[in-house]
Image (cartoon, rainbow, N blue to C red):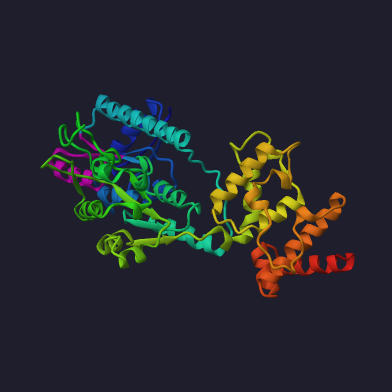
């Protein structure tokens, strides 16, 4: 593994000797003589290790470290300092440097620190790969184009680099956990653990023990000390999914943890500091729960420092056609997914459905259809019954597709006009609203209705 190293020192002799030593060890080396040059080279990306002098002509190395950390760079900084400046080196480590080395530099010590940096980079890369395999994280995600999702992306981009607590709300299946993962991936904690916890799946009597751990003998059955999820996620991010399911006593304890950044194991008198970012998610209205006394108001205010509302799929209808095609060809989909196509009638049904289960329901419907599809073509028969069954309608509405007889083109024609006219009827005659609900352009709706009028019903 070749490391990309930056040597930052204003003394040419020191800089060149150190660079030569590192190049001889197989590193790709860049040099900088001042803070301005260092910022430019670091901003370009790819620097694994930086040997950084502290006293520089246009600033100091501590400022370089602080700016790199604020920018989310993963560069490992090793400060180079004289013996008399050890206190300053320690200050640099508090700012985010990994280590320091004292002048005059010895080759053996430089190479030892370099090996340590290489081993840590290897572990970090392996951990990232394992997370991708175990948690299914991937860069292959659908890029929504709806204005609501562009706003959501901007909120994620703004809050991710901070350590702010985030509350994500939205209906079941809209992708709240994916939003939380995106925040984690774009944060400075990306190399640490992302730990999702389903608060509704833990029995009330065990929540506190699961969260914060317990000592041996703390309660019946506690035959050994347990670390707890908050300590397991040290340095990373915890997602408290279904936060509205937490019992009130645990809500009080969680508020204290958020305020004091420390936990106490069940059965212990000792408090332990924690460094964990907390993201909460819910499909319930926490404001209404506060009003009814089922959720603590102070915890609600503390969790919702930064609130993200994820829109339901029915408000993103312009994205449904693209999302369907993405799910048909996405990596990891069942065999033949990249070649699957949609029968026009099946596509009309998918576009007209309201998707109460949101993206999760659409994803499940497509995966089921891919399994059932013959010859790589999805037909109406391959879709889930709850999607294809006829909705309740007025007595004078056109008959459902199941009542049609004739050849396939005739059945498709009759079903399409049924869907179109029913949508217009349910929209109170407002064709613009009907087109939005169907996920098609208003001009397309007019054209289709005119075509059907010419062909006759």
Q: Residue at x 31, y 33 (%)?
A: 18
Residue positioned most to the front: 395
353 and 401: which one is in front?
Answer: 401
Q: Position of residue 228 (x, y in %)?
A: 25, 38
Q: Position of residue 167 (x, y in %)?
A: 37, 57
Magenta stretch bounds: 77-103
Find residue 165 and report its image quarter.
Answer: bottom left
Q: Per the image, is 63 magenta?
A: no
Q: Position of residue 189 (x, y in %)?
A: 35, 45
Q: Residue at x 66, y 37 (%)?
A: 371
Find residue 32 and report its image quarter.
Answer: top left
Residue positioned most to the left: 269
Q: Residue at x 34, y 47 (%)?
A: 199
Placement of the N terminus among the 4 image quadrants: top left
Placement of the C terminus among the 4 image quadrants: bottom right
345 and 96: which one is in front?
Answer: 345
Find residue 269 and report its image quarter.
Answer: top left
Vertical arrangement, residue 339 with respect to residue 58, above or below: above
Asked if residue 56 shows in the view, the reply is: no
Q: Residue at x 14, y 38 (%)?
A: 83
Asked if residue 54 shows in the view, the reply is: yes
311 and 414: which one is in front?
Answer: 414
Q: Position of residue 435 (x, y in %)?
A: 69, 67
């Amino acid at each position: 593994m070749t490391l990309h190293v930056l040597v930052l020192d204003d003394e040419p002799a020191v800089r060149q000797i150190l660079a030569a030593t590192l190049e001889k060890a197989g590193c790709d080396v860049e040099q900088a003589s001042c803070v301005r040059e260092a910022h430019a080279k670091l901003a370009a990306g790819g620097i694994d290790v930086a040997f950084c002098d502290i006293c520089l002509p246009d600033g100091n190395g501590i400022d370089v470290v602080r700016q790199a950390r604020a920018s989310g760079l993963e560069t490992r900084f090793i400060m180079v300092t004289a013996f008399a400046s050890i206190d300053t080196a320690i200050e640099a480590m508090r700012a985010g440097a990994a280590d320091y080395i004292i002048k005059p530099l010895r080759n053996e010590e430089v190479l030892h620190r370099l090996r340590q940096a290489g081993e840590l980079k290897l572990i970090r890369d392996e951990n990232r790969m394992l997370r991708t395999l175990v948690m299914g994280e991937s860069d292959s995600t659908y890029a929504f184009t709806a204005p609501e999702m562009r706003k959501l992306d901007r909120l994620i981009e703004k809050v991710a680099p901070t350590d702010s607590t985030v509350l994500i709300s939205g209906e079941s299946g809209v992708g709240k956990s994916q939003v939380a993962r995106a925040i984690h991936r774009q944060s400075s904690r990306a190399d640490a653990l992302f730990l999702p916890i389903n608060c509704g799946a833990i029995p009330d009597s065990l929540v506190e023990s699961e969260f914060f751990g317990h000592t041996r003998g703390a309660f019946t059955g506690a035959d050994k000390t347990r670390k707890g999820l908050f300590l397991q996620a040290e340095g990373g991010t915890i997602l408290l999914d279904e936060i509205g399911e937490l019992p009130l006593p645990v809500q009080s304890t969680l508020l204290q943890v958020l305020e004091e950044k420390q936990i106490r194991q069940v059965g212990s008198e000792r408090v332990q500091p924690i460094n964990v970012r907390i993201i909460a998610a819910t499909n319930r209205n926490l404001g209404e729960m506060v009003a009814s006394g089922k959720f603590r108001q102070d915890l609600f205010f503390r969790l919702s420092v930064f609130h993200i509302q994820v829109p339901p799929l029915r408000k993103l209808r312009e994205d449904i056609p693209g999302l369907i095609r993405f799910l048909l060809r996405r990596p990891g989909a069942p065999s033949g997914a990249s070649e699957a196509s949609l029968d026009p009638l099946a596509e009309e049904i998918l576009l007209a459905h309201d998707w109460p289960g949101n993206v999760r329901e659409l994803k499940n419907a497509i995966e089921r259809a891919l399994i059932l599809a013959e010859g790589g073509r999805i037909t109406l028969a391959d879709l889930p019954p709850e999607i294809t069954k006829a909705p309740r309608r007025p007595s004078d509405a056109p008959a459902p597709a199941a009542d049609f007889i004739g050849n396939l083109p005739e059945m498709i024609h009759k079903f399409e006009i049924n869907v179109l006219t029913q949508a217009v009827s349910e929209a109170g005659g407002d064709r613009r609203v009907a087109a939005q609900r169907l996920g098609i352009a208003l001009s397309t709706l007019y054209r289709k209705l005119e075509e059907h009028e010419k062909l006759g019903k």
